[in-house]
Image (cartoon, rainbow, N blue to C red):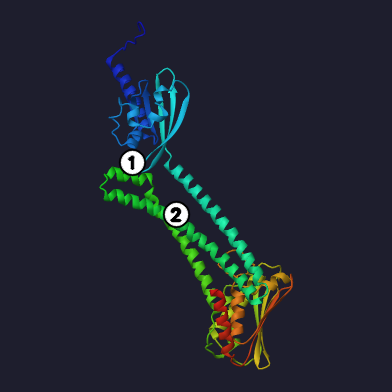
Amino acid sequence: MDGGEYQFESLEEAARLFAVVEHAKKEWETTFDSIEDGIAIINQDGTFKRVNAALADMVGMDVRELPGKSCCEVFPYHADSGCPAKLKAGHREVEYEVSIPWRRVYREASFTVPGLNTVVAIITDITKQRLDEERIKRLADEAVAANRELKASMRELKATQEKLVASEKLASLATMSAGLAHEINNPLGFVTSGFGHVRDWFRRVDGFLDEFRQGAAKSDLDRYLKRNKLDRFGKEVSPVLDDIRMGLERIRAIIRAIAAFVEQGPLATSPVDVNDLVRQVVNDVGEELPVGVKIEPRLGDIPKVPGSAEALDSVMRQLIENAVFAVTGADGEGKVQVTTASKGDGVRVTVQDNGVGMDQEVVSRALDPFFTTRAPGPHVGMGLAVAQAVVRRHGGELEIRSSEGKGTVVEFTLPAKTPDPEPDRKKSAARRKALRT
């Protein structure tokens, strides 16, 4: 070595060293171009010294065209924020937005490189972040507006309830309406939220189709697909559609329960053997009884009663399933007794359990529509209300007796005489009119 110059001992050594340098250069270039953020090395005169493929892709130019070009020509926003080449020390951050060919938002962070007289600018696509922020702000505004409307609705409801206190029937109707609104509002939230999500995805698809119809190049279409993550369309939309379906099925179940509650009209009757109904329901429910739960039928010598076997079957299933639920998980053996006996010319059916029981406040509300003590799930809180409506359609009555910690007794009677349909029709008409109001 003489004067700072290195003397190679042979051409082979020089070739080997140059090969190592060339390999390192290619590795650096590959790494530089594989970075997703746009990167530009800018000279002091404001021209590009080098850019990576991501930045060239952002501005829609060939990566080989950019070196030597003025950064202020490629990025017109520099006219407002100042050319990053003038940065003498430290770093700065600016954000800018472009609308052609579609709206994108970028953040540029510039850093000085001491000793090299250059500035490194890193440009990041923050469109998704901005869209998310806008969506969150929009949802927050909608939530504030909805909360304002809800408060107004609650004030109106309270005023209405105060006016309805004088009428027992109208007060019950108000309770039922409030329960119905609450029950439908939850699944409706799934549907509304899911619809907004699906609409957003279809807007992206619609934008892609617009580009396609306008004859955009395949590379532009590929970039659009990547930026809008349309390759995840199926994975993102499918579970949302499942939530919408579940919400709609929940609403449909509520409507069916309401229909069963208010439906009256002529009752198609035939002689019904209540003992046969009890045997069938006990047999069906008994196939899936929890461990430690037993159903004990005690069937008396009873006459057949006129009625709808299908409707009375639904009453028996509801009462027995409620009793099984009450004894499930209780200390000791859970027992449900189903007793039938004659009462005058009719029949009395008693379903008794040794479960947790209910306090008197719960008992007083047990027959209210949409009241339930179960955890949120498929139950809409209409089971006992519908059971009572069915029993009354048959001319009978349903009663609940319970003490906390001592189990529950649900008892209903059925007359041996076919009920007069005229009062039922009047009650049905009054209920339907009240619901419409």
Residue 360 has which mark?
Answer: none
Mark 1 neighbour density, 10 Å: few (under 14) some (14–19) many (20 or more): few
- The residue singled out by tag 1 in the image is 100
In the picture, measured across the screen, residue 126 lies left or right of residue 293, that is left
Q: How many marks?
A: 2
Would residue 149 be visible to someone looking at this image? Answer: yes
Q: Secondary structure at mark 2?
A: helix
Amino acid type of the residue tagged 1 in the rendering: Ile
- Residue in the image at 30% along x and 37% along y: 60
- Residue in the image at 54% along x and 63% along y: 185
The answer to whether 182 is drawn above or below residue 90 in the figure is below
- The residue singled out by tag 2 in the image is 197
Q: Position of residue 251 (x, y in %)?
A: 51, 68
Disc with the residue nearer the chain's start (1 vs 2): 1
Select label 1 or label 2 by which is in front.
Answer: 1
Of the 4 image quadrants, the one containing the N terminus is top left
